[in-house]
Image (tube, coloured by chain):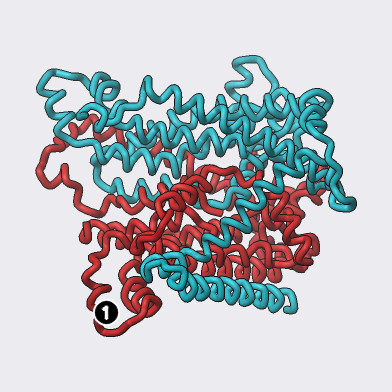
């Protein structure tokens, strides 16, 4: 009970603080010669402005600072220069395997997942009776809590789990043993990807479906008049018209893949051999098992950001070749 | 925290099949042949199976006795059906308390989040001030920033305030409008409302906050409800925050209890029936919300479409 009251009190304090800052902006800025409208605007965005300064801007600077120190919570930070970065890149036995696993996971699950989501979206865009109900069903996996999905798939992909049982005839034909998906390291990555592919149903498919429905029907009609087949319509109309949406989902997918966390926490992977997800490595260094290597973990999070930036930039650079914007054409 | 991904999901759901489609009205979409329809239904059913079999397995497992969990071939229909599992799970750990904690965290964060975001969105949508466009670009930029960068300093701030192992780090940040995607969506809605409505109220002597609360908020109610749904499920499912900030069991939300339970079970006889029962219990509120709140998503689009 006391715990709830404490937090309610903190919340009230935060609200009062924001309100005071808001009121100050509203009253004081006009005295400095600002228009009433502008002062009102600042007063209204005050919650975000304060939040940005306290919870984003300061933490970014602080994190960068910590990354050059040996800060461990218990002692004042000592400046160690690039030491953390050098150690991560040269002597951390978990880093390179984890970078490899994270990148491989992204490189495999992302294209497969997007292709699957596109197929699902194309299917859901067909005009058949009862399609609304099918769409409701197909969105279900996306609303199930991620942690429940991970546990479910860990169960399905157990050595004697339903997945292996269902595929056992296939294994027999191929003459292989049932893979132990998450206990045998050779199969951990494929297991994680199978798990992620259940996500082809859900958010990306819904986004792409909305994109498909925005493609003007006339384009298809005139293509048909010209005698285009289904494949030609798909490659020459659907894909180019959908490319901005695909680009958008790809960018977000890249960021999300590098940030993958929960599967790595629920499925224990040895960082030294197969590697684990980068964010799990950051978490382990900063918080797990009494570790408080805040400086070291901060440096690692900046390396993660660098990875994200490089991949995002590459994706942006590639977009000129395949993303089609109608406005470009007109101008 | 919600990201742009969830936002566009919500926007996409707004585009619901029950609304008349333009192609349909002008009749430009041809009726498919019977064969094409059959193929469509076959593929839809195949996908449906891929979705439903795992979900069915979750429920079936949750109703099995311990001894039937690993029998070969797998038991597709639980026999006997052990409803008791759903009673037992409440006692293996204080899950009732975990539920109360989850509801407390979720409702508090959701309320703080949606109203502060609405206020900020209104400011960005309606008032001109120096640096507004730059600030809005910065706001959009924060959507791309991975949370891992700010995670450690934020933790240290809360530690300095003596608030580790309390609910505060999981909720108080919400009143600082921590959902950039929500602000973006609400701003779009506010911008589509004609300014004459406010002008009339201002002439009648209403101040900015009165205009906001009495006129603007009711007009964007569908968008607010859509955001409330997203925020609810985001906070309900959030895992990393509780994992980092909470240590003592009596503070756990359900998700952390589930994690602790999954870590503590023995390798020899894992209680997957309990774990699946807990997963079902945790999922039910969200699924219920999803089925019930779909109509708000639809209303959201209808209002947007009417104004535009």
- Residue at position x 34%, y 50% from top? A133
In the image, the chain rendered in red is B
- Residue at position x 42%, y 36% from top? A248
The local crowd at label 1, few if under 14, some if 14 to 19, many if 20 or more residues have their Cα within 10 Å, is some
Q: Quadrant of residue A165?
A: top right
Quadrant containing the N terminus of chain B is bottom right
In depth, the one of A110 and B20 nearer the eye is A110
In depth, the one of A261 and A308 nearer the eye is A308
Q: Quadrant of residue B107?
A: bottom right
In depth, the one of A130 and A264 nearer the eye is A264
- Identify the residue under disc 1: B201
Residue B21: x %, y % from top left: 20, 47
* Left or right position of A43 against B260: left
One can see residue B295 in this view: no
Quadrant containing the C terminus of chain B is bottom left
- Residue at position x 59%, y 57% from top? A53
Residue A93: x %, y % from top left: 82, 26
Q: Quadrant of residue B73?
A: top right
* Left or right position of B185 against A200: left
**Relative to A62, does residue A24 appear above or below in the rendering?**
below
Residue A121: x %, y % from top left: 36, 37
Which chain does tag 1 point to?
B
In the image, the chain rendered in cyan is A
In this view, the residue farthest toward the right is A75
Residue A15: x %, y % from top left: 58, 74
- Residue at position x 20%, y 29% from top? A330
């Amino acid at each position: 009970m006391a715990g709830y009251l404490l937090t309610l009190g903190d919340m009230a304090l935060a609200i009062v603080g924001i309100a005071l800052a808001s009121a100050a902006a509203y009253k004081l800025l006009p005295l400095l010669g600002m228009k009433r409208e502008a002062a009102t605007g600042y007063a209204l965005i005050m919650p975000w402005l304060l939040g940005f300064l306290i919870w984003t801007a300061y933490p970014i600077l602080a994190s960068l600072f910590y990354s050059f120190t040996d800060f461990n919570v218990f002692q004042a930070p000592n400046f160690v220069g690039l030491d953390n970065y050098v150690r991560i890149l040269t002597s951390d036995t978990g880093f390179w395997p984890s970078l490899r696993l994270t990148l491989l996971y992204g490189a495999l699950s992302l294209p497969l997942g997007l292709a699957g989501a596109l197929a699902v979206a194309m299917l859901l865009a067909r005009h058949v009776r009862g399609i609304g109900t099918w769409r409701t069903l197909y969105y279900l996996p996306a609303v199930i809590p991620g942690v429940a999905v991970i546990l479910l798939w860990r169960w399905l992909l157990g050595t004697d789990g339903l997945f292996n049982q269902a595929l056992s005839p296939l294994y027999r034909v191929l003459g292989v043993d049932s893979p132990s998906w998450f206990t045998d390291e050779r199969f951990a990555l494929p297991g994680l990807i199978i798990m992620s592919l259940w996500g082809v149903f859900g958010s990306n498919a819904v986004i792409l479906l909305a994109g498909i429905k925005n493609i003007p029907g006339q384009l298809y009609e005139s293509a048909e008049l010209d005698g285009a087949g289904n494949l030609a319509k798909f490659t020459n109309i659907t894909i180019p018209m959908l490319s901005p949406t695909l680009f958008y989902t790809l960018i977000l997918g890249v960021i999300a893949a590098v940030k993958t966390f929960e599967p790595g926490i629920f499925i224990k992977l040895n960082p030294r051999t197969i590697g684990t997800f980068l964010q799990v490595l950051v978490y382990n260094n900063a918080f797990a098992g009494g570790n408080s290597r805040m400086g070291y973990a901060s440096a690692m999070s900046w390396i993660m950001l660098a990875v994200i930036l490089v991949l995002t930039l590459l994706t942006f650079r590639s977009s000129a070749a395949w993303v089609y914007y109608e406005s470009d054409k007109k101008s | 925290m919600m990201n742009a991904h969830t936002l566009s999901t919500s926007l996409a759901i707004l585009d619901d099949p029950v609304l008349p489609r333009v192609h349909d009205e002008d009749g430009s979409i041809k009726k498919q042949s019977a064969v094409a329809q059959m193929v469509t239904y076959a593929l839809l059913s195949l996908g449906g199976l891929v979705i439903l079999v795992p979900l069915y397995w979750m429920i079936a497992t949750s109703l099995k006795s311990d001894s039937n969990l690993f029998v070969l071939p797998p038991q597709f229909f639980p026999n006997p059906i052990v409803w008791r599992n759903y009673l037992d799970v409440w006692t293996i750990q204080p899950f009732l308390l975990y539920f109360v904690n989850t509801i407390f965290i979720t409702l508090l964060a959701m309320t703080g989040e949606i109203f502060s975001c609405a206020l900020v969105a209104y400011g960005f949508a309606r008032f001109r001030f120096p640096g507004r466009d730059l600030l809005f670009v910065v706001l959009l930029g924060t959507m791309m920033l991975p949370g891992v960068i700010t995670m450690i300093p934020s933790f240290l701030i809360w530690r300095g305030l003596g608030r580790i192992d309390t609910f505060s780090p999981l909720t108080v940040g919400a009143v600082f409008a921590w959902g950039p995607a929500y602000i973006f969506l609400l701003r779009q809605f506010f911008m589509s409302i004609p300014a004459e409505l406010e002008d009339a109220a201002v002439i009648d002597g209403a101040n900015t906050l009165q205009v906001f609360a009495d006129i603007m908020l009711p007009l964007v109610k569908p968008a607010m409800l859509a955001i409330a749904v997203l925020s609810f499920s985001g906070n309900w499912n959030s895992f990393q925050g509780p994992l980092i900030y909470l240590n003592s069991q009596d503070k756990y939300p359900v998700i952390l209890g589930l994690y602790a339970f999954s870590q503590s079970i023995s390798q020899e006889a894992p209680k997957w029936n309990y774990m699946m029962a807990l997963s079902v219990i945790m999922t039910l509120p969200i699924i219920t919300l999803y089925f019930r709140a779909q109509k708000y998503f639809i209303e959201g689009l209808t209002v947007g479409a009417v104004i535009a």
